Amino acid sequence: MRTLVNSLRLIAVVAVVVAVVAQWLESARSPTYSPWDFFGYFTIQSNLIVAVALAVTLVAAANRKRSDLRVSLLRGAATVYIATTGIVYNTLLTGANVSASVPWSNDIVHKVVPAYVVLDWLLFSDRARLLFRHVWWFLLYPAVWTTVVLIRGATDGWVPYPFLDPAQGSGVVAIYVVGIAVSIALLGVLVVAMSRLRLVRV
């Protein structure tokens, strides 16, 4: 079972890297391409965080430190962020124009990886029991990301997602920001709660 779990995680890491690189190569062909814009998307960042978290988990497993608290915190945070990506894409962005996306890459980063990572966290027991105070740590990165995006939207006009467009009015944007922040906090609570489960021992 341990070998299977590690193999699945390695496949997930490779899938993320291949999908992001494929989309990057496609985006780089656009005359308006900017690396700051491409890597500014929460989707791209959360998928890269997942790749790093799972890679670190694999290294920890090789060193027989599968339940290390720091590794589990990183995996837990990655689970919260990628779950947010999946939920937001499949609810708020269902009508978004994805003509510039690589279709299979888009499916991997928005659907396949989020589903796999959540199941990985839920099912497999090689993680430490997290505490509810750790939820505050999960909120730091989204807070910094949102702050940077709002500053960019107000200065150079670039926003990664239409619901953060300042042209809608600050009140509308604030509602979305608060709503997503609450959702991330609730996801954090669920991730901490799930860390207590031991459904499949590895």
Image: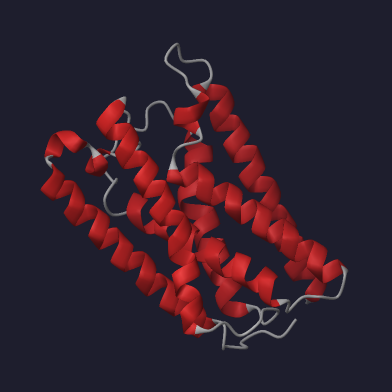
- Which image quadrant is residue 160 in? top left
Where does the image place residue 138, in percent across and percent down from the top left? 48, 66
Of 9 and 34, nearer the camera is: 34
**171 on left or right of 40:** left
Where does the image place residue 168, in percent across and percent down from the top left? 13, 38
Of 138 and 53, nearer the camera is: 138
104, above or below 56, in the image: above
Residue furthest to the top: 31
**Residue pictured at 48% horizontal, 22% vertical:** 34
For the N terminus, which image quadrant? bottom right
Q: Is residue 88 visible?
A: yes
29, above or below 196, in the image: above
Where does the image place residue 107, in percent across and percent down from the top left? 48, 45
Of 59 and 20, nearer the camera is: 59
Where does the image place residue 73, in percent across and percent down from the top left? 60, 71
Rendering colour mode: secondary structure
Residue furthest to the right: 63
**163 on left or right of 55:** left
- Which image quadrant is residue 97 in? top left
Q: Total of numbered circles in the picture?
A: 0
**Residue pictured at 75% horizontal, 81% vertical:** 202
Q: Is residue 12 visible?
A: no
**Residue pictured at 55% horizontal, 61% vertical:** 78
**187 on left or right of 20:** left
164, above or below 92, in the image: above
**Residue pictured at 65% horizontal, 47% vertical:** 15
